[in-house]
Image (cartoon, rainbow, N blue to C red):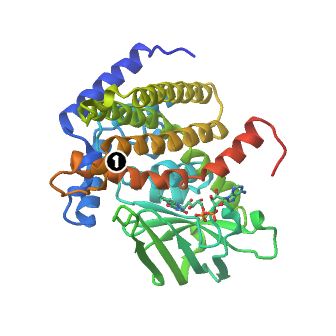
Amino acid sequence: MDFELSAGERRFRDEFRAWLAEHWAGDWAKVRRRFPTPEAQIAFLRDWQRQLFDAGYIGLHWPREYGGGDASIMEQAIFYEEMARARVPELPNVIGLDMAGPALITHGTEAQKRAHLAKILSAEQIFCQGFSEPNAGSDVAAGQTRAEADGDVFVVNGQKVWTTYAHFADWCILLARTDPSLPKHKGLTFFLVDMRSPGVTVRPLRQATGEAEFNEIFFDNVRVPKANVVGRLNGGWEVAITTLMFERGPRTISRQLMLRHGIDAAVELAKATARDGSTAATDPVIRQRLAQFYIDGEALRFTTLRTLSRTIRGGVPGAQGSAAKLFFSETWQRLLELMLEIEGPYAMLWEGSERAIDDGYWQFRFLRSRGDTIAAGTSEINRNILAERVLGLPKD
Ligand SMILES: Cc1cc2nc3c(=O)[nH]c(=O)nc-3n(C[C@H](O)[C@H](O)[C@H](O)COP(=O)(O)OP(=O)(O)OC[C@H]3O[C@@H](n4cnc5c(N)ncnc54)[C@H](O)[C@@H]3O)c2cc1C
């Protein structure tokens, strides 16, 4: 691939970098826990996405007729890379931008596009993803939430779980079973559900970090208009696959920078940590491990760039995205384990403790990183995808 940006891409990068420098200073990962309430945090994040939207940076590669910028995949990738480089706040509407939006652009009716796409971009409509259920996670097609036709509506009953941001979401992309007599992949339908509908109950689930980022959702006779079906009745699986491919797709570019930031921080931590009359950075085993992380970081960078250039040449994000997701999430966890090892007994201290290194920040990241090998497809599922679709091995 060609690593050089074109003159236009360089201009775009420099302008966006300057915009970010003007609008944000600091490291979001470190200040994100400082809000008095989760509601205050989400209000801040909605406003942040709105600012980016007003400046023309959200939905860059969406079609212009739906409020996007008609930009190239490369510019979209530069956007993610610069966001990661500047350590700015995250976008609260990730599900809307990366999953619901692309699903509607590909499969939605004109009325659905007009009702939702512009509001996804401006963060007026935050989306959540109601796919996983207590007995259907990796095998998401096994979901049992039912939707039964009744006049102009479907009546939905069932439960979803691990639904990120459901407690703030305005809308949910929901997979529900509309024909139990068909094989499991063929009896599902993809719905848009207004989270304020009567019968929707959201219960936050507290994670190991102490934060409640995801939720259970209960649907109790929730009436969803038939006009909110996306794609064909019983054709939900193909719409869901569109969303899952995008979940492991263009955003992966920012992961290699997140890893690089972590590796740089680990080197600084090793240099600053006293050990055996010197510092941890002089320990040959730690040096060896840090060097290996540097190599892994570069490997991820080049893998990501290779996937990007394939996508630019007309391929779709998919199985290759699984490789980057798998490699990032496992390397990231190992890096955080090393950082806690370097901290030694100080790793026991949490935020607010007087002697905690970096205010317990790496402990928080360590606990949060456990979910990274589960969300968006577990490591085992991503290995299966790579084995079958990239290496051509027989199905399991
Ligand atoms: C932080 C976080 C955010 C999430 N956000 C959302 C969200 O917004 N919306 C949503 O719908 N879901 C969300 N999820 C759920 C996530 O998609 C599921 O947890 C994931 O798909 C795994 O499903 P499960 O938890 O039911 O585990 P299971 O599928 O029960 O898996 C249990 C174990 O068995 C292994 N396994 C399962 N099948 C196979 C197989 N065929 N071959 C080999 N091993 C296998 C798995 O790898 C895992 O180790 C989120 C999860 C996390 C951690």
Name, please, the residue furthest toward the left: 354
Q: Secondary structure at mark 1?
A: loop
Note whether residue 49 is visible.
no
Q: Position of residue 106 (x, y in %)?
A: 61, 48
* Residue assigned mark 1: 90
Note whether residue 183 is visible.
yes
Q: Position of residue 189 (x, y in %)?
A: 67, 67
Tell me the amino acid under the disc marked 1.
Glu
Residue 381 or residue 45, whichever sits in front: 381
Give the image quarter of residue 69.
top left
In the rendered view, does 223 fall on the left or right side of 123? right
Image quarter where ligand 1 lies: bottom right
In the rendered view, does 74 fall on the left or right side of 146? left
| Image mark count | 1
Q: Position of residue 394 (x, y in %)?
A: 84, 44
Find out if the beta carbon at label 1 lies less than 8 Å from the nearest ligand 1 atom.
no
| Vertical order, 138 against 60 (above or below) | below
Q: Position of residue 351 (x, y in %)?
A: 23, 56
Residue 371 or residue 43, whichever sits in front: 371
| Vertical order, 135 against 57 (above or below) | below
In the rendered view, does 259 fall on the left or right side of 381? left
Check the picture and name the quadrant holding the N terminus: top right
Residue at image x 68%, y 45%?
A: 383
Residue at image x 44%, y 25%?
A: 291
